[in-house]
Image (cartoon, helix red, strand yellow):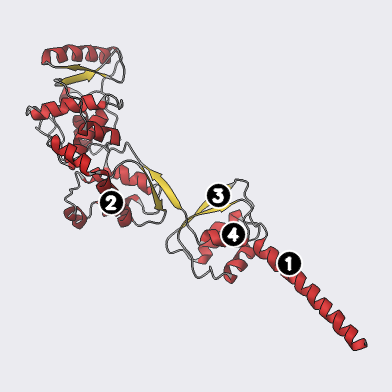
Amino acid sequence: MKLRKIIGIFSLVVVIGGTILGVYFYKKIFAPNTKFSDREVAIYIPTGAQFEDVSKLVAPYVESVETFEWVADKKQYTENVKAGKIVFTNGMSSNDLITALRNPVPVKISFNNQETLNDAVGRIGQQLEPDSLALLQAFTDKKFLEENGLTEDDVLSVIIPNTYEFFWNTTATKVRDRMVEEYRKFWTPERKAKAEAQGLTPLQVSALASIVHKETVKSDERPRVAGVYLNRLNKGMKLQADPTVIYAKKKVDNDFGQVIKRVLNAYLPIDSPYNTYKYNGLPPGPIAMPDITAIDAVLNPEKHNYLYFCASVTNFGYHEFAVTEAQHNANSAKYHKWLDQNDIKK
């Protein structure tokens, strides 16, 4: 009886001890282990990171780094680090944190109104792991350009402004290839047919759309502006687009940061293929990243007889359109008078 009693007591101690130990480990694994006040926070694990790097990134957001590291080891995460954007939610346990670390989430990136390829890759590089230099090298790679019928002048055309999902650590070449894929999807058979009806290739549409984009921010006016330029092209006239002169000056000066509000006569002789006052036809590539409304304006232009337009001084943001040069000169005189009155010199 005495032995049986001892065995019973020992068994009870073992059960209680096991229960206590079980509760301890359960809490260690599943109890909340965060210390940030926001609903969620994001960390970014760089490519090639080791667990020690991850632990340093996680440390500011957890109550117990020791517990986090212990659970990470038990769940064999320490040897299987994944790069990418990781989102932690307030109140997560160490177990939840490891699960989150194993499942990077995509990021949404967007870009528009970029004037040059350098600007575009800079904007993308701010939102993803590859830096602007790696992205620029990918987009200007000679083999890539040749295989896709592109040049450094027109490659900006393949970056259609929109919102896209990428994993944060997507490589520069994969970002580039995705942009080409999206570009091809954008150019549906219907859009290609409309381009052909205007006597343009998709790349030429982008070049003209970039001028339309720069000429007016009013999307409802863009089809009319596009119609003017298409009329001029069809008549063999120079486009004489002020935004191309501004672009040419910036390119010649190697200074795209300068602000030019007024096109001076001194700019018109600038010897650049982008200067449509000097050279016939379209520039060799887009002078900016045209948005979709500008592209569709070129594909769906307003039908009219206008050959000229000038900024309006009564309906700001819009333009006055003219069929004859005499009408245009009258509109232009009003506009230049307004510039002088407002002391806009350049």
In the picture of the structure, the residue carrying the numbered disc 4 is 96
In the picture of the structure, the residue carrying the numbered disc 3 is 41
Judged from the image, the secondary structure of the residue bearing numbered disc 1 is helix
In the picture of the structure, the residue carrying the numbered disc 1 is 23
| Contact check, label 4 and label 2, Cβ < 8 Å | no
- Number of numbered labels in the structure image: 4
- The three-letter amino acid code for the residue at tag 3 is Val
| Residue visible at 31% across and 38% down in the picture | 114
Q: Position of residue 252 (x, y in %)?
A: 19, 37
Residue 181: mark: 2
| Residue visible at 58% across and 51% down in the picture | 89
User: Which corner quadrant of the image does residue 338 belong to?
Assistant: top left
Q: Position of residue 314 (x, y in %)?
A: 29, 12
Q: Label 4: few (<14), some or many (≥20) within 10 Å?
A: some
- Furthest residue toward left: 236
Q: Is residue 147 above or below residue 224?
A: below
First reached walking from the N terminus: tag 3 or tag 4: 3
Judged from the image, the secondary structure of the residue bearing numbered disc 2 is helix
